[in-house]
Image: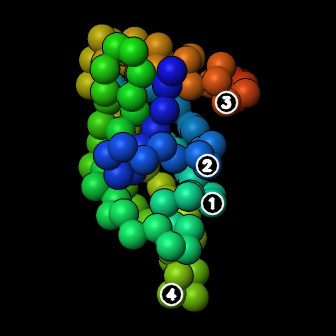
């Protein structure tokens, strides 16, 4: 099972748009997540966003690079950057994303 959490123990049900960029030599990579209707912002939720946690059977990947976007003073979207500095970090992230994509019906298209 692969899931994303913004507060420990609470699974985010909004499936994000994910964009990937990678240096030509593969030395660094970035994943940008955009959650357009995150459940963490739903009325009645009192949990604080402490980061983004990507959890699967191998363990946990995490980032604190999480930003909320506001519309008319209300939180609307969440944008997250996950930075990878090595081939091993990229490989681990891709294993998580393969599991997450399979569970949530995400597809992959390579840009030119």
112 lies left or right of 39: right
Q: Which residue does the image show at 34% across and 59% down from the upper left?
A: 49
- Label 1 and label 2: CA atoms lie apart by 6 Å
Q: Residue furthest bottom?
A: 72
Q: Which residue does the image show at 63% across and 58% down from the upper left?
A: 36
Instruction: State the residue position of label 3.
Output: 104
Pointers 1 and 2 in contact (C-beta within 8 Å): yes
Q: Earlier in the sequence, mark 3 or mark 1?
A: 1
- Label 3 and label 1: CA atoms lie apart by 15 Å
Image location (x, y in percent) of residue 80: 43, 49
Instruction: State the residue position of label 1.
Output: 37
Pointers 3 and 1 in contact (C-beta within 8 Å): no
Instruction: State the residue position of label 2.
Output: 14
- Label 4 and label 1: CA atoms lie apart by 15 Å
Instruction: State the residue position of label 4.
Output: 73
Q: Is residue 93 above or below residue 17?
A: above
Q: Which residue does the image show at 48% across and 32% down from the upper left?
A: 3
Secondary structure under the numbered disc 2 in the rendered image: loop
Kindly indicate the quadrant of the structure image that contains residue 50.
Answer: bottom left
Pointers 3 and 4 in contact (C-beta within 8 Å): no
Image location (x, y in percent) of residue 13: 59, 46
- Label 2 and label 4: CA atoms lie apart by 21 Å
């Amino acid at each position: 099972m692969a899931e994303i959490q913004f507060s420990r123990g609470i699974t985010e049900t909004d499936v994000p748009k994910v964009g990937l960029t990678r240096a030509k030599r593969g030395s660094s990579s970035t994943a940008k997540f955009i959650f357009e209707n995150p459940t963490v912002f739903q009325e009645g939720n009192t949990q604080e966003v402490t980061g983004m946690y990507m959890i699967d059977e191998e363990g946990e990947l995490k980032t604190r690079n999480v930003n909320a976007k506001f519309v008319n003073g209300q939180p609307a979207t969440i944008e997250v950057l996950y930075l990878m500095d090595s081939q091993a970090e990229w490989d681990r992230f891709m294993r998580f994303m393969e599991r997450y994509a399979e569970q949530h019906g995400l597809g992959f298209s390579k840009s030119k």
